[in-house]
Amino acid sequence: MASMEVDSANSNTSDPDNPRFSVNVLQLLKSAQMQHGLRHGDYTRYRRYCTARLRRLYKSLKFTHGRGKYAKRAITQSTVSEVRYLHVVLYTAERAWSHAMEKRQLPDGPNPRQRIYLIGRLRKAVKWATLFAQLCASKGDSKTSLEAEAYASYMTGNLLFEQDQNWDTALLNFKRARAVYEELGKVGDLENQVLCRERVEELEPSIRYCLHKIGKSNLQASELLHIGEMEGPALDLFKAKLEAVMSEARSQQAVSMTEFHWLGHRFPISNAKTRVSILKARELEKDLQGSADSLPVEKGLSIFDKIFAAYHEARSSIRSDLVSAGNAESVKDDLSGLDKAVSAVLGQRTIERNQLLVKIAKSKLVRRHDEKNEKVTKPEELVRLYDLLLQNIADLSDLVSSGRDRRQEEVTFAEECSLKSLAFRGERCFYLAKSYSLAGKRAEAYVLYCHARSLIEDAIQKFHTANISDPLIEELKTLIEECRANSCIEHATGIIEEVKAPENLSKKISNMSLTGAEKKSAKYLLQSLNNYESAVGDSNIKTAPHIEVFPPAFQVIPRNPIVLDIAFNFIDFPSLENRMKKDRKGFISRLWG
């Protein structure tokens, strides 16, 4: 309703016979998309919003299509008497477009029947977008007409893009839309300029892809992944097309990939699906290693998830081949070795991902609470992450050591795993000491810091003895100094607390009250005489202890028995009638008696 009021307020009614309306098309659509599902790529929700919006518009305009039997009412230039008629056409185009995108996002991709329906919905979107541009040309101001033309060109480009044909025409439409948004980005308020620049950036990958398909670009298929790193609803069709292109490129590369090399072993790969999955994982690993320092944390974690998915697909293909191998022992041995190698690589990537999580947690450990209102990491969370790392290292070491004929590369790899395990144990012990320190347990923290220091020194010495260079060594050297400093701090703090302990104890005893505050959850000393619980000397106790509830509560006590004389009811007394005085009766009474 707010956007309708803005558009109505901006309407140019200087000519009452032919009013000119103003619609901020891009701003209106961007606001609706971000507020109703497309912020998270939920096209179903956005389509339902467009349907509900159209229903409200039809009802408010009294432009319904009859009761019972449907009677179509077309929107023409003579029909458009206010700006809401333009909104009807615009949201109808959006509904058709969002329905097509909903079909595009099916889990296994649209099948041929669904793809025909998808293209039909895109044709509907183009039809309504073209009608919207025509109506705005006659009923809208110059800016509205330009935006409508750009919107229609964008929809036409999407249709041709999905059809995989007429790349020249698609390129022309995308360039026309980009040129309009570039010009509109130079005028208007700041919000409109930002939205126009964002739309220009979203159109750029589609233009470059069209140039690539035409052959006017030197862009290689392997480099296309770097184009689609932006986010936005305008890029979803491009990303789907890009994934199809990369799958085709991987299939072509997989023909030349016949073996998988791992720790001196060569395992043949006969299944094409396994080759494609391994190639996909290796491409993602290259992206991860090439920009490890400049890559955002969220992007790195998402790449790790894609790597895991690719290796899991490869393992499922290998195990399917194992089931269908039958009694061919040589084939089964090769497939088992390949499964072991892929599982080991998957274990290595899992360790790298958990190390990235540790790095993120360490960066949040030193932050203050007022920095972007982010949650500060507790040392216990780092202890849990190091537990996961130790478990990953143990699983990987067991997997590598499980073979009968072990090569020298496998022995060296197992030694590296044991050294990393020792280093992770030292770091885990360090953060465990930190958690004890925050809990006020100085003696335990001091002992743990000293133990962590000895573990780390042992790990560094073994790294040097084995002549292994690892980035972890510099981190361990820094951690030794922190262990030494923290152990000194804990020692000094413990001595200070021990010196002040009698004073604090006497102060707390003097603060002891008989009853204290009336709290249901309060514990009293006389109620826990059989349990050893420190009530005064413990540093974790913030409130003064209470001795007993006063005044005491009511208790049930026995009272004297009540004696009831019930023997009277069971006594048979003698008759006293002979002793009772008899009444004398007269003559008349005798006659009547």
Image: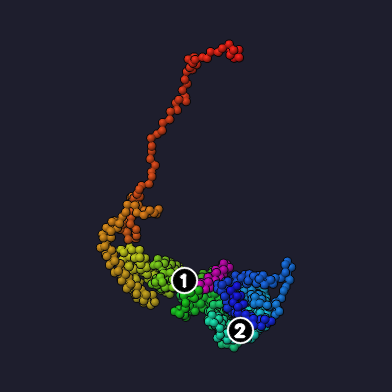
Q: Which residue is identified by label 1?
A: 350
**From what the image shows, is residue 332 above or below residue 583?**
below
State the image coordinates of residue 333 (x, y, percent, origin top left).
Answer: 52, 70
Residue 324 vs residue 153, the one in the foreground:
153
Q: Residue at x 46, y 23 (%)?
A: 571
Instruction: Decide which of tag 2 and tag 1 comes sooner along the chain.
Output: 2
Does the magenta portion include 309? Answer: yes
Q: What residue type is labelled 2?
A: Lys
**From what the image shows, is residue 309 above or below residue 152?**
above
Does the magenta portion include 12? Answer: no
Mark 2 packing: few (<14 Cα in 10 Å), some, or many (20+)? some
State the image coordinates of residue 240 (x, y, percent, origin top left).
Answer: 59, 77
Residue 117, quarter of the rendered image? bottom right
Q: Which residue is drawn at 34% across and 68% down?
A: 452
Residue 88 vs residue 593, the one in the foreground:
593
For the N terminus, which image quadrant?
bottom right
Mark 1 packing: few (<14 Cα in 10 Å), some, or many (20+)? many
Tag in front: 2 or 1: 2
State the SS at label 1.
Answer: helix
Q: Which labelled disc corresponds to residue 143?
A: 2
The furthest residue to the top: 587
Query: Which region shows up in magenta?
Result: 304-326
For the C terminus, which image quadrant?
top right
State the SS at label 2.
Answer: helix
Say whether residue 336 is left or right of residue 158: left
Q: Which residue is drawn at 66% across and 77% down?
A: 82
Residue 425 vs residue 293, the one in the foreground:
293
Residue 11, quarter of the rendered image? bottom right
